[in-house]
């Protein structure tokens, strides 16, 4: 038994050893035919094995075949493999079944073909009696061809590792493949469907991109043609770890649809494109289809009512929220999708919220392939009512676009504000229409073939901008041709475009290199027109090159320039020539205002008097003889300006890249043979007539330090000097110095005699402010002292405190308000218009111990303020002592539209009337006078202004004494003529005149209103104390010709109740008033009294005769002449005239009627009583009459 068991064991061991070792000693190649036959049976096609064959039985049965080709013997193999290694199941083999536990296929090669009918032909399937549990494929290649289109593709490096139940059993596994150098990982799972089809689940993931493709559906075959019905989903997750180990985080998006595939087409229904997470997703819906065959491509249509990209794209960086930057991010995101087939998509969106604005009516037709996107049409309406249309080719991965664009923007400011994403300046921008070919890349932006209409003006040309790189600065090239060019609008548009970050998401830096080529017919810059402008210039790292620059007329200035300046070289060099011909300064002021408003104001205020001007300038920059990095620049300016010969030379030594540390030396010599130089410097009021002038000045010192300045202005009767140091500061010039001025005469004061002026002061300059202190000088005979400051600008501001020993008030007022000069002294007011006022503002405090009001009247302790403003001059708070009283006044002048308006207020309190009138030892009037007067007027010349004055006031006098008026004159004259003196006008005038000259009239007080109308001051009703003798006064003073017309009437009450009166008439110009005595009323009164007296005497004689007749009645019978006739009563008028006839003979029996007085004689001129007003000349405003006369 033991021997038997031992024998069986040995036998079994030998069998096992034989099974293990035996196959290694078997030449399986001898059985190649058997292997090929069996393989052909399993494959259903001819199989050829050209490589080695090996078989192993234990421990695991294994068959390895190399060099396998499948296909007809005489044709090309439809399938091949480098090696097939099958691990067989031993139990299955013992049961007579072929079951491969593991099948390894190395480098399989096979092809799939789609015929014209859409049927797919591929490699043979494994026979049904072969079962495979697990299959592993390495380095496979599948060639796919389409017979209809002759197109094909290759799936390379195909691998698979999974379970397969051949031929129709379920498949589960994963692998990878490479298509067009792109590696994809995939997962596949199949199962048997209930309707005989194959349920398929496929997932594909690109190896280097966060993208997944999944499809699930049913695959069925009908007559050899496949049909697939399922779903498709493409998605980019929010975060993904790539096979390279890199982790990518981004906004998720996905595309899902229903998918149906047959032999002719694939239909994508219910397409849903979603961008962003679910809570803020953007959705587009639509359909798509893919037609197989020649020119196969995907055609899709996507639509949406409204999408909110601002909500979908959560951006913390403000620059990333700008519309173009947002679109750029989207394109870069979608640019990661590499399409297997060309794509044509139509997009329609009613409204898109982007960058805080609303984009409406978005319509696009796009064509895409694996390399780029072709925009067939893209049209939308952007904010600002801008209609945009463009087309072209876009490479989203490289961020490149090229194609035509059309833009119609009624409000480009709003459009660019939306594109930039920030608030922009409120600048007026006109409508813009643009047509151009755009080329955009990461390196540059170019617009070629530009045709634009901006603010109703047409332009043509090109614009190119190169973005800043690590090696090169930004560069701008502009070429433009236009018959009309609005530079103001272009500057405003450029400011809008450059405000903030650029709309492309990259900052538009100020270009370090600029090239300009322009030919313009008419140009508008700062509101000033220019004609025929042409420019060819370039600025880059090599320097500034001006090939040509010409402007035929820029606001009255013609310009020609050419040259070059090589700035980067060490040392720099170059030349520049400039010719300037200026008739008007409008253009230069406008250009200066764009750079410095202060410089423009100075140019406007100071340069206008130097026109016309013709200047030639030359600048040369050469290396220094000693070498080094510094350059020596020389400038020479020659020409004329309004008759002024200009010669300026200078040089500077320094580095052009640091000009503030250069050493500067300038010399200037300005000469004129007439008064042109003085007029240009603002000293035109100092020239009585044209006279020569010379200004010589120098500037020497470092630009960044203290520069010595010396200037000397000289001419006949004129000398001015200024010395000091100035330096450049942020506020402008700063410095200190001294100034001196000496004038033999100041013609602006319009005096007949010379009025010399000398002044000296210390100056302190701080930008626009020039302070002066320790002012000491003489103005005529008066010394002047003070301090203050000037603030340059428009208007010039003056604030000062001045004290003068003596001030001529009429001359000062005339000079300030611009009364034009007269050719000779005259009492007439000038009829020429007021001279223009200088644009000056400020306040000057005036003090003077003495102020001359008229040639014979002055005030003391005078003080007041002169307030100046454009169009307004006011003498405020003027006060002083005059004739023992107080004088105060306010004068305000306002100039507008060629006319001057004046408002004056003058008041006088308790002044001594004799001192005021300068009546000498025997003044005609005495007392203390007070009064006030307000006047207003408006006119364009002094004469009309005086004639327009109107106003009111009052005057009062206390203890008034009037010489030449005797209140007893009427009474004495009446008594004299009552005694029988013959009443004749000559006798009355002589008698009353002698009495008036010897007497005077005293009143405790008088008061009267004043009215002013048409330039005439009228005295109203005089109010006096009630007394027997009453004084009445009336009259006026004409301010136009200084004529007085007054009447003083003295009246009294007689015993008859009548009021005899006598008048004194004053008439004539001030200084030559005629005084006449008017006794016409008194003569009439006395004549009537005399006639009445004679009548009464006649009546008395008649009554006496009748009484005698009654006493002697016997006399009636006497003969005539026989009786003695009684003597007639003595005529009271008898005496001197003994032969005077008896008036009784002619008297009627009835009562005598009163007689009519004889005609009155003309007024009799009286001699001037002692102490009356002396003749005085009219107080002139130098050569003009005074504005207000205090008399």
Image (cartoon, helix red, strand yellow):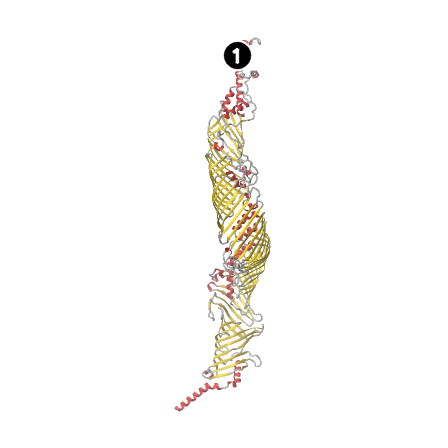
Q: Nearer the viewer, residue 1174 or 838?
A: 1174
Position in image of residue 909 (x %, y %): 46, 35
Looking at this view, is 1068 or 487 the one in front?
1068
Q: Quadrant of residue 715?
A: top right
Query: Residue 370 location, x and y as percent?
Result: 54, 68
Q: Does 218 appear above or below 747? A: below
In the rendered image, residue 374, in percent from the top left (x then y), is placed at 56, 65
Name the residue tied to disc 1: 1108
Residue 1000 lies, with reference to residue 654, above or below; the image says: above
Quadrant into which the N terminus falls:
bottom left
Residue lying furthest left: 2
Front residue of 748/884: it is 748
**Residue 106, relative to residue 882: is it above or below?**
below
Label 1 element class:
helix
Question: Is any part of residue 376 visible from this angle?
Answer: no
Residue nearer the viewer, 79 or 361: 79
Residue 766: % across, % down: 48, 49
């Amino acid at each position: 038994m033991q021997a038997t068991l031992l024998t069986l064991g040995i036998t079994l061991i030998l069998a096992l050893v034989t099974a293990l070792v035996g196959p290694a000693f078997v030449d399986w190649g001898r059985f190649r035919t058997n292997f090929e036959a069996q393989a052909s049976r399993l494959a259903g096609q001819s199989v050829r094995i050209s490589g080695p064959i090996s078989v192993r039985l234990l421990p695991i049965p294994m068959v390895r075949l190399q060099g396998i080709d499948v296909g007809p013997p005489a044709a090309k193999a439809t399938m091949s493999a480098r090696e097939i290694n099958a691990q067989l199941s031993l139990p299955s083999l013992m049961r007579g079944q072929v079951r491969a536990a593991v099948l390894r296929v190395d480098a399989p090669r096979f092809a799939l073909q789609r015929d014209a009918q859409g049927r797919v032909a591929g490699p043979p399937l494994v026979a049904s009696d072969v079962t495979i549990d697990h299959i592993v494929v390495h380095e496979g290649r599948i060639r796919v061809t389409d017979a209809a289109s002759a197109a094909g593709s290759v799936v390379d490096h195909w691998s698979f590792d999974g379970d397969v139940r051949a031929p129709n059993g379920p498949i589960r596994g994963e692998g990878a493949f490479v298509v067009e150098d792109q590696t994809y990982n995939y997962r596949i799972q199949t199962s048997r469907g209930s309707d005989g089809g194959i349920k398929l689940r496929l997932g594909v993931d690109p190896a280097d991109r966060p993208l997944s493709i999944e499809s699930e559906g049913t695959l069925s075959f009908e007559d050899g043609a496949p049909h697939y019905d399922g779903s498709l989903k493409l998605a980019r997750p929010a975060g993904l770890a790539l096979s390279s180990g890199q982790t990518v985080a981004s906004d998720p998006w996905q595309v899902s649809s229903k998918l149906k595939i047959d032999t002719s087409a694939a239909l994508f229904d219910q397409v849903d494109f979603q961008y962003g997470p679910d809570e803020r997703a953007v959705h587009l819906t639509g359909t798509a289809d893919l037609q197989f065959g020649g020119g196969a491509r995907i055609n899709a249509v996507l639509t949406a009512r409204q999408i909110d990209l601002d909500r979908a794209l959560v951006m913390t960086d403000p620059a990333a929220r700008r519309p173009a930057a947002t679109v750029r991010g989207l394109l870069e995101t979608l640019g990661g999708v590499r399409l297997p087939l060309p794509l044509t998509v139509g997009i329609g969106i009613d409204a898109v919220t982007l960058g805080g604005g609303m984009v409406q009516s978005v319509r696009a037709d796009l064509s895409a392939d694996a390399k780029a996107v072709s925009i067939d049409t893209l049209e939308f309406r952007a904010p600002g009512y801008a209609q945009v249309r463009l087309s072209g080719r876009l490479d989203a991965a490289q961020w490149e676009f090229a194609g035509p664009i059309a833009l119609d923007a009624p409000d480009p400011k709003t459009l660019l504000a939306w594109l930039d994403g920030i608030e922009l300046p409120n600048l007026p921008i006109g409508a813009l229409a643009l047509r151009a070919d755009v080329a955009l890349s990461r390196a540059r932006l170019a617009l070629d073939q530009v045709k634009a209409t901006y603010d109703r003006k047409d332009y043509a040309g090109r614009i190119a901008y190169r973005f800043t790189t690590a090696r090169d600065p930004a560069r701008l090239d502009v070429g433009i041709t236009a018959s009309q060019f609005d530079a103001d609008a272009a500057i405003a548009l450029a400011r809008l475009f450059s405000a903030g970050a650029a709309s492309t998401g990259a900052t538009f830096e100020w270009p370090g290199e600029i090239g300009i080529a322009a030919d313009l017919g008419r140009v508008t810059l700062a509101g000033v027109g220019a004609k025929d402008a042409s420019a060819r210039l370039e600025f880059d790292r090599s320097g500034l090159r001006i090939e040509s620059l010409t402007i035929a007329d820029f606001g009255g200035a013609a310009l020609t320039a050419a040259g070059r300046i090589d700035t980067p070289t060490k040392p720099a060099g170059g030349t520049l020539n400039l010719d300037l011909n200026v008739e008007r300064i409008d253009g230069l002021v406008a250009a200066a205002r764009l750079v410095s408003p202060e410089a423009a104001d100075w140019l406007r205020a100071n340069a206008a008097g130097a026109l016309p001007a013709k200047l030639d300038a030359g600048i040369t920059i050469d290396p220094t003889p000693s070498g080094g990095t510094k350059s020596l620049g020389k400038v020479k300016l020659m020409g004329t300006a309004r008759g002024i010969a200009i010669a300026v030379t200078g040089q500077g030594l320094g580095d052009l890249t640091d000009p503030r540390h250069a050493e500067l030396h300038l010399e200037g010599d300005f000469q004129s043979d007439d008064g042109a130089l003085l007029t240009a410097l603002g000293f035109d009021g100092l020239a009585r007539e044209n006279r020569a002038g010379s200004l010589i000045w120098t500037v020497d010192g470092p630009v960044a330090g203290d520069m010595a300045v010396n200037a000397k202005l000289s001419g006949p009767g004129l000398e001015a000097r200024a010395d000091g140091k100035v330096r450049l500061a942020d506020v402008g010039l700063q410095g200190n110095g001294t100034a001196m001025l000496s004038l033999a005469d100041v013609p602006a004061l319009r005096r007949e005699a010379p009025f010399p002026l000398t002044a000296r002061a210390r100056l302190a300059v701080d930008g626009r402010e020039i302070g002066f202190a320790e002012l000491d000088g003489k103005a005529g005979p008066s010394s002047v002292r003070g301090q203050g400051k000037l603030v340059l600008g428009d208007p010039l501001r003056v604030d000062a405190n001045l004290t003068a020993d003596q001030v001529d008030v009429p001359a000062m007022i005339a000079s300030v308000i611009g009364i034009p000069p007269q050719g000779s002294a005259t009492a007439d007011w000038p009829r020429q218009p007021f001279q223009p006022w200088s644009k000056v503002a400020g306040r000057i405090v005036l003090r003077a111990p003495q102020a001359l009001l008229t040639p014979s009247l002055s005030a003391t302790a005078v003080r007041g303020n002169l307030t100046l403003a454009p169009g307004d001059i006011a003498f405020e708070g003027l006060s002083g002592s005059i004739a023992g009283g107080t004088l105060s006044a306010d004068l305000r002048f306002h100039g507008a539209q060629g006319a001057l308006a004046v408002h004056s207020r003058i008041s006088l309190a308790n002044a001594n009337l004799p001192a005021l009138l300068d009546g000498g030892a025997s003044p005609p009037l005495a007392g203390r006078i007070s009064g006030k007067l307000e006047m207003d007027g408006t006119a364009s010349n002094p004469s009309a202004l005086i004639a327009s004055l109107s106003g009111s006031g009052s005057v009062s006098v206390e203890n008034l004494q009037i010489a030449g008026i005797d209140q007893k004159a009427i009474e004495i004259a009446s008594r004299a003529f009552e005694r029988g003196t013959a009443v004749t006008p000559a006798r009355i005038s002589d008698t009353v005149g002698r009495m008036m000259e010897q007497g005077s009239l005293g009143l405790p007080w008088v008061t009267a209103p004043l009215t002013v109308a048409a330039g005439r001051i009228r005295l109203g009703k005089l109010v006096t104390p009630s007394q027997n003798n009453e004084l009445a006064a009336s009259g006026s003073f004409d301010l136009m010709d200084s004529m007085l017309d007054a009447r003083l009437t003295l009246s009294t009450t007689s015993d008859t109740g009548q009021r005899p009166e006598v008048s004194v008439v004053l008439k004539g110009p001030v200084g030559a008033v005629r005084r006449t005595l008017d006794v016409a009323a008194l003569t009439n009164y006395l004549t009537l009294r005399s006639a009445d007296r004679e009548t009464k005497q006649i009546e008395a004689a008649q009554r006496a005769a009748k009484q005698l007749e009654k006493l002697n009645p016997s006399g009636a019978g006497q003969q005539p002449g026989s009786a003695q006739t009684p003597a007639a009563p003595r005529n009271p008028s008898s005496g001197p005239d003994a032969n005077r006839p008896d008036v009784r003979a002619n008297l009627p029996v009835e009562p005598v009627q009163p007689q009519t007085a004889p005609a009155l004689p003309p007024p009799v001129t009286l001699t001037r009583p002692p102490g009356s007003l002396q003749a005085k000349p009219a107080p002139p405003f130098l050569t003009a009459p005074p504005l207000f006369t205090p008399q």
